[in-house]
Image: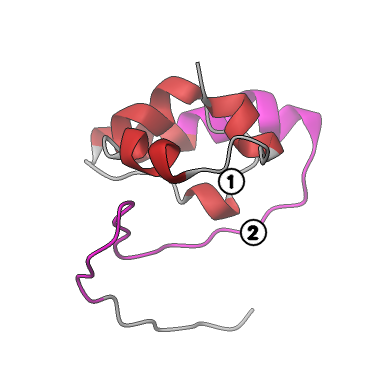
Amino acid sequence: MGRQRLEHRPADQVLQLGTSLALDFSQTRELAETLFPRLDAIVREAGGRLYPAKDAHMTGSDFRQAYPAWEQLEALRDPSLMSRFWKRVMP
């Protein structure tokens, strides 16, 4: 497994991102139901947040709490376009 070092700089973006930690697992139902929610809780408790572009299970409440500027992004979205992610996390 290779290591990658990225430099994160503040940017004028609606969804600010930060330092990343990537953990790769073979997806199984057991992981999705048990391990991932536990890891998500650890991230939240540490003041972190999930990276939405790389996530397949983030809840709407987690997304809206982690990215409070989501409403600005929604205001820019073309109403005819809606990803599966956006359908999952929007109220």
Q: Which residues are magenta?
A: 9-38
Alpha-carbon span between mark 1 and mark 2: 11 Å
The kind of secondary structure the magenta stretch mainly shows is loop
Residue plotted at (43% across, 62% down): 21
1 or 50: nearer the eye? 50
76 or 27: nearer the eye? 76
Determine the secondary structure under disc 1. loop
Q: Position of residue 65 (x, y in %)?
A: 30, 28
Check if residue 18 falls in the magenta segment.
yes
The picture quadrant where one finds residue 70 is top left
Q: Position of residue 57 (x, y in %)?
A: 62, 33
Question: Which amino acid, by three-letter code, is at mark 1?
Answer: Asp
Identify the image quadrant of the N terminus: bottom right
Q: Which residue is the site of mark 2?
A: 24
69 or 10: nearer the eye? 69
- The residue carrying pointer 2 sits among few (fewer than 14), some (14 to 19) or many (20 or more) residues within 10 Å by Cα, namely few
Residue plotted at (57% across, 43% down): 78
Determine the secondary structure under disc 2. loop
Check if residue 36 falls in the magenta segment.
yes
